[in-house]
Image (cartoon, grey):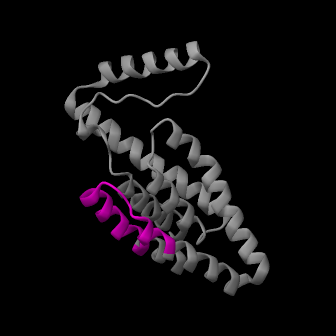
Amino acid sequence: MMRFMIASLITWPAAIMDIRLKKIPNLYILPIALTGLISCSVRFGLKGLGLGLLNMMVSLLILIPLNVTGSIGAGDIKLMAAVSLIFTTRESLYFIFLSFLAGAAWSLIRIARRKELIIRIYTLRDYLMECFREGKVKRYKSLGTENDVIPFGVCIFAGTLLLFVTEVW
């Protein structure tokens, strides 16, 4: 229970930074990763350190391809990988899923409020056809407004809260 609370306390300031700065600085993420590695090794010894690094690597392997498409920022990826050091592998995967679920819900609400569903569907269709035609994954082109970008740090914070609620209660 304590590690879920810690994860929420860690991601709350990151969400605020992402809203205000539109990024999550490395100087914030690095101490989280180091603390997570130390915690893993103190709790479970060398085996814990290995499991923590495995969680971090699995998170990176899942998330880095999403950065290639422009779906998620590098700071978000590093934060999620650092936070995953706190969790078991199963919890880390669930945390990533819940964070993206929060992001999807936020996006759908924004699209519905702006009445942009049809244009978003056509934009996604065009993007997928272009990737298929060229045989490679490309960066996804937004509609061109700054308001298209969601501060995903907020979704990461929501993912930790949802994990806390679903795992503890």
Confirm whether the magenta stretch covers residue 10: yes
Residue 53 sits in quarter: bottom right
> Which residue is at a point 50% across and 69% down the rendered structure image?
169
- Determine whether, in the image, residue 49 is placed left or right of residue 138: right
Q: Is residue 96 above or below residue 132?
A: below
> Which residue is at a point 61% across and 62% down the rendered structure image?
91
> Which residue is at a point 57% across and 77% down the rendered structure image?
34
Residue extending furthest toward the bottom: 42
* Residue extent of the magenta highlight: 9-30
- Secondary structure predominantly adopted by residues drawn in magenta: helix
Q: Is residue 147 above or below residue 12?
A: above
Residue extending furthest toward the right: 47
What is the total number of numbered labels drawn onto the structure image? 0
> Which residue is at a point 30% across and 54% down the rendered structure image?
22
Whole-percent x and y of residue 68?
52, 38
Q: Which residue is nearer to you in this view: 132 or 98?
A: 132
Q: Can residue 1 be seen in this snapshot?
A: no
Whole-percent x and y of residue 12?
36, 68
Whole-percent x and y of residue 7?
48, 71
Q: Which residue is nearer to you in this view: 169 or 145?
A: 145
